[in-house]
Amino acid sequence: MAAKGTQAKIEVLNKIKEVFGKDFIGEIDKKIYVWAQDAGERVQIAISLTCPKNPVGMVSTDGAGYDFSAPTIAASQFTPAEFTEEEKNNINELIKALNL
C-alpha cells in the first residue's frame, strides 16, 4: 500500500516540471531541484514535498483560494512536566554524587 499523498506528489511533480520547463533539474533524495534567478544570479532551489496529516488554511469565503491567515490547526496548550518529590530527591542526589 502506497503512502498517503503518493499519487498527488507525482501530479505536483509533473506540474512543477511543466512550469519550470528547461529550468527543471530533477528529483534527488526526495527533493525536487529547479533553477531560479536571484538578483541576476542563477541559483538552485530545492523543494520538498510532503502530504501533511493536518492540512492548513481555510477556503476563503469568496471561493478564490486559501486564507492562510486563519489556519485550521488549533494551537495546543503546553503544560510543562512537574517533578514529584521523589524525582526531585533523585535529582539532588545525582547532583551531589556527580559533584555538579
Image: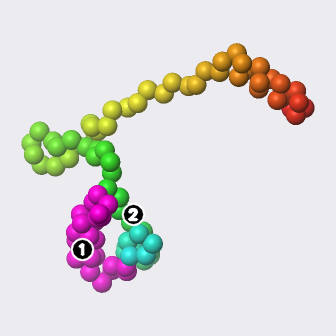
- The residue that appears at 45% across and 72% down in the rendered structure is 29
Residue tagged 1:
14
Q: Residue at x 71, y 22 (%)?
A: 87
- Residue 56 occupies quadrant: top left
Q: Confirm whether residue 47 shows in the render.
A: yes
For disc 1, the neighbor class at 10 Å (few under 14, some 14 to 19, many from 20) is few
The image position of residue 41, as x and y in percent, is 44, 75
Of callouts 1 and 2, the N-terminal one: 1
- Determine contact: label 1, label 2, CB under 8 Å: no
Position in image of residue 97 (x %, y %)? 88, 30
In magenta, the rendered stretch is: 1-26
Whether 3 is drawn above or below 33: the answer is above
Residue at image mark 2? 48
Mark 2 crowd level (few <14, some 14–19, many ≥20, 10 Å Cα): few
Residue 12: say if magenta. Answer: yes
Residue 37 appears anywhere in the view: no
From the image, which quarter does the C terminus lie in? Answer: top right
